[in-house]
Image (cartoon, rainbow, N blue to C red):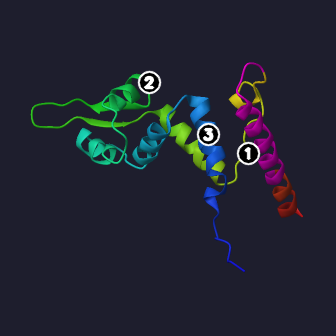
Amino acid sequence: MKSKPKNDYLKYWRVARNFIQVKYNLSEPDLEMLLFLFSEEYFTRKKYKEYEKLFSWDTDRFYRLMKDGWIENFQQRQHRTTALYGITYKASRVISSLYKKLNGGEYPESQQSNPYFVKTNVPYTHSLYRRYIKKINDSIKQEQRHSLE
């Protein structure tokens, strides 16, 4: 019998990732970049480009992330100093929400908070994810009841 990992964070990675991508209209590479930048308090364009080399080619990604409010300029470039950037409060909240879900947090089940719970004019995959999210939430609630006993 295989030993179970102590922390099974990635069990529902697909569900959590898709939820964040659909809710916030983020591509997978954009989300992965924000995950990297989340742990960087401030970063330079050089640091950004260094990691971006691992992604598919998208020359507009940095400017799009800035325009869409995911990255902000903290320090303008002046004479000999380089510009410093950081993720916005919005980006920080989204990534924290993703980590919370990966750590066993519940998913919202309202139409306003979860795009998978909108029932009109949506792809079939939304209903599949909706059912699975309900299953995950039920499992979380059951686990919480057992821990209270």
Q: Which mark is residue 116?
A: none
Q: Is residue 114 visible?
A: no
Q: How busy is the neighbourhood of tag 2: few (under 14 within 10 Å), some, or many (20 plus)?
A: few
User: Compared with residue 116, is residue 29 higher up or lower down, i.e. above or below?
Assistant: below
The residue carrying mark 2 is: 68
In terms of sequence position, does the residue under pointer 3 or pointer 2 come before the other? 3
Residue 34 location, x and y as percent? 44, 41
In terms of sequence position, does the residue under pointer 2 or pointer 1 come before the other? 2
Q: How busy is the neighbourhood of tag 3: few (under 14 within 10 Å), some, or many (20 plus)?
A: some
Name the image quarter holding residue 60: top left
Residue 96 location, x and y as percent? 56, 44
Q: Are marks 3 and 2 in contact (CB under 8 Å)?
A: no
Please state which of the two labelled residues, at mark 3 or mark 2, is closer to the viewer.
Answer: 3
Q: Is residue 25 left or right of residue 122?
A: left
What whole-number distance in Å separates the C-alpha atoms at marks 3 and 2?
A: 19 Å
Residue at 77% across, 44% down = 132
In terms of sequence position, does the residue under pointer 1 or pointer 3 come before the other? 3
The residue carrying mark 3 is: 18
Outermost residue to the front:
124
Going by the numbered disc 3, the residue's amino acid type is Asn
Name the image quarter holding residue 134: top right
Q: Which residues are magenta?
A: 120-140
Q: Is residue 105 left or right of residue 21?
A: right
In the image, residue 134 lies in the stretch drawn in magenta: yes
Outermost residue to the right:
149
User: Compared with residue 127, is residue 7 higher up or lower down, i.e. above or below?
Assistant: below
Residue at 61% across, 51% down = 13
| Principal secondary structure, stretch drawn in magenta | helix
Q: Which mark is residue 106?
A: 1
Nearer the observer, 137 or 53: 53
Residue at 82% across, 53% down = 139
